Each structure stands twice: as C-alpha cells, then as structure tokens.
Image (tube, rainbow, N blue to C red):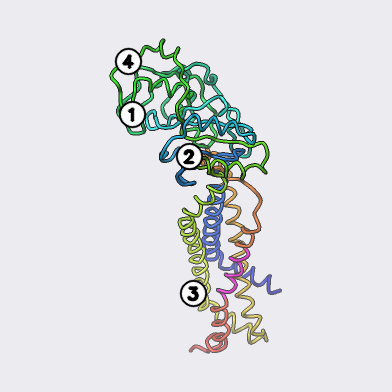
Amino acid sequence: MILRLAFGSLLARALTVGMTILAIALSVALFLGVEKVRTGARASFADTISGTDLIVGARSGSVQLLLYSVFRIGNATNNVTWESYQEIAAHPEVDWIVPISLGDSHRQFRVMGTTQAFFEHYKYRGGRSLVVGQGHGLDDLYDAVIGAEVAATLGYEIGDPIVVSHGLASFTDHDDQPFRVAGIIERTGTPVDRTVIVSLEAIEAIHVDWQSGAQTGRTTPVERIREMDLTPSAITAALVGVKSRLQIFGLQRAINEYPEEPLLAVLPGVALQELWQIVGVAETALIGVSAMVVVTALLGMMAMIFSSLNERRREMAIWRAMGARPATIIGLLVLEAALMAAIGAILGLALLYAGLFVAQPLVDSAFGLWLPIDPPTARELSVLAGVIGAAAIASLLPALRAYRLSLADGMMVRI
C-alpha cells in the first residue's frame, strides 16, 4: 500500500518530480559516460598494437619508446644500428621482426619507413590486419601508402605526388625525389591513419645527398640512386614477435643486456600501464567532477523534498491522526526519494546507451576511439545501486523533519 501511495504522491507533483528525475538521469548518464570513455580510451590505446610481444629501440624510457614508435609522439634519443637489428632478428626466439625508421614528415604527418612485414604483422583492435582499400602496397622505390586520415585531410588520391620534408618541423623538402600515392589504408582508428608509409630503401634514397643532417650540395640522378645499395645503416625501432610467450622475458633480458650498444626492449602492455599511471591523476579528476555532478543532483532532490514539506504538512498530520506509525511517515518519503533515484538511474542508463549508439561511429571516425556498447558491468550496476542508496539516505533528513513537525504544524487550527 505504501508503494501505491508513494507513486500517487509523485504523480501529484509530476512537474517538479519530473525535473528532479531528469537531473538525476543526466548526472548518471554523465558519470557512466565518463567511465565508458575512460575504459574505451584504455582499450583503444591497448588495441593500437596487438600481437606484438616486444618493442625494441635505443635505450631511453619505456613510455618514450612506446610513444614515438607506436603513437608517433616525440622523437627517439638515438637510433639502432642495422647490424644490431640483424643480430636481434637472428635470435632463435624471434618469429618475426618489423623495422621502423622515423624522422621525416609530410605536411605535419609523420613519415615512416618500413618493410612489407609491417603490413603482414601489424595488428590492431584484437588482431585485425591492415587493409589497403585502394591501390597497392610498396611495389616501387618511390611508392607511398598513406593512412585514411592523411588522404581525407589532404585530399589525396591514387597517383598523386607526395614530397617528403626533412625532419618534423623543417622548411627543407626532398623535392628532387617525389613519391607517388600507391595505396590508401582503410581507417583503423590508430596512428597508422595519420602516417605516410614508405620503404626503408626510400628513406635511404632521399638522404643520399645528405650528410650529418644537412645537404651536401650535389644532386644524384634518380636512375643512379635506383642502382645503389640502399640498405639502411640504422633504424629507429623494431616491433618483435616471438615464437613462444615463454621466451619473451629471456629475449627481453638479452636485448637489454646487449653489449654492442645500449638497447631497450619493452612489453607494450607494461609500457601502457606506466603511461596510464602518468595520466591517472587526470582520470581521477574527471571521475571526481562527474561524481560531484551526481551529488549535486541528489542535493537538488533533497532540496525539492524539503521545499514540498510546507505543502504536505497537513497530509502528514492526517496520516498521523489516522494512526500511521512514525516509520510509515519516514518510509513514505524515503521510498519516494528511492523511486525518483531508481527511475532517474534507469533513464540515465537508457540515455547513455542511446548516446553511445549515436556517437560510437562518429567518435571512432573522428578520434579513433572505440566505445563498446556492452551490457552494464558489475561496476556500473553498483554505481546505480549507490545512487539509489544515496538518495534514500539523503531523504532521511527531510523525512525526520516531516515526522517531527507533522502534528505541531499540520493540525494547527488557523483562524
């Protein structure tokens, strides 16, 4: 019976109750949305490189190595000699290895030199392979395969020329050796979308007439360059896959203790965890702000209940006069608050999934951030239960006040 009375009381104040429920729903949707974005961001970062067991580069920091080799952020402190790369590739534990050479750019997009092995072994988002949707791979020395974002931003099509610039913020172009767009990779939501991929030999070719980072003044004909031995002298980093996961740590130790030059081998997952520890403060602050929005909505609900007490004093007094127990009066107000919070939480969950359904493809295409539409997790359900419980607790204060003032104020005879 008390449940029917609570519903009837809420319906009698439909406008104010509806606004309160909407505030709770929006705050819950915001809090759960931030949580979805947080977990989606972590998953997207982790899925940027899947299936790679080790990343090898010059000795620096594990996060720095991860950032410049995978996410194209920052620069390497040093290079890895080609001889060291070949020795690592010859290790019996190594199943495959992909060399990467960075340093040049094209209109603010990074240029990466690599081999055909990159297209064969680079995996993302749970094991997906790169797909060259238009054109073909690196068949010629001056072929370039570009990411989807490069093509969309610069308006490139198959056959268009590309002139690579020396360095990342340089006004010097390798315009004597232009490349040609040979292929466009389908959108992946990873840094590959923002990368211009050429062969390692091409990186060497455009630097034939350079020495110590500066032009020598001579210009070697392209026909002669094609006949040269363009084996690189050094690379920036390498992605490594091992034959057995049991061999990862042994190979990592061997590379880290390599006597010929200081090298560093890191596990991508471990480096990602270190990266999340660095940005964890921002995550905590964002969650804290979202939690404060929920608290504000609950305080608004409590204020609404307080403001309605003046209108309901006589109602409560009649209930007391008819023999209602104190627990009934308190329970009625607490139940009303819990019902408002429950309806708001369910509505907020519905708003969240509606927003995810609409925003998922847009966010994925714009930012490369995949927001999974999965059933509510135990953590999310516990948040909803916490909101309902907090609403019930918050309503205790106005409920106790209503109980104490019901007889004193409600039954007072006014002349």
Are the residues tagged 2 and 1 within 8 Å (C-beta)?
A: no
In the rendered image, the vertical position of residue 283 relative to residue 144, given as above or below:
below
Nearest to the eye among marks 4 and 3: give it. Answer: 4
Residue on which disc 2 sits: 71
> Which quadrant of the rendered structure holds the N terminus?
bottom right
Q: Which residues are magenta?
A: 385-395
Q: Name the N-terminal-most of marks 4 and 2.
A: 2
Q: Amino acid under label 3?
A: Ser
Look at mark 1 in the image and give the residue it sits on. Answer: 212
The reply to whether the C-beta atoms of the residues labelled 4 and 2 are less than 8 Å apart is: no
**Which of pointers 2 and 3 lies earlier in the amino acid sequence?**
2
Distance of label 1 from label 4 (alpha carbons):
16 Å
* Residue 382 quadrant: bottom right
- Outermost residue to the right: 1
Provide the secondary structure element on which disc 4 rests: loop
Give x and y (percent) for residue 152.
Answer: 45, 28
Q: On the rendered structure, is 361 left or right of 278?
A: right
Identity of the residue drawn at 50% across and 71% down: 304
Report how far apart the C-alphas of labels 2 and 3 lie in the structure: 54 Å
The question of residue 34 being in magenta is answered with no
Residue occupying the point 60% across, 68% down: 10
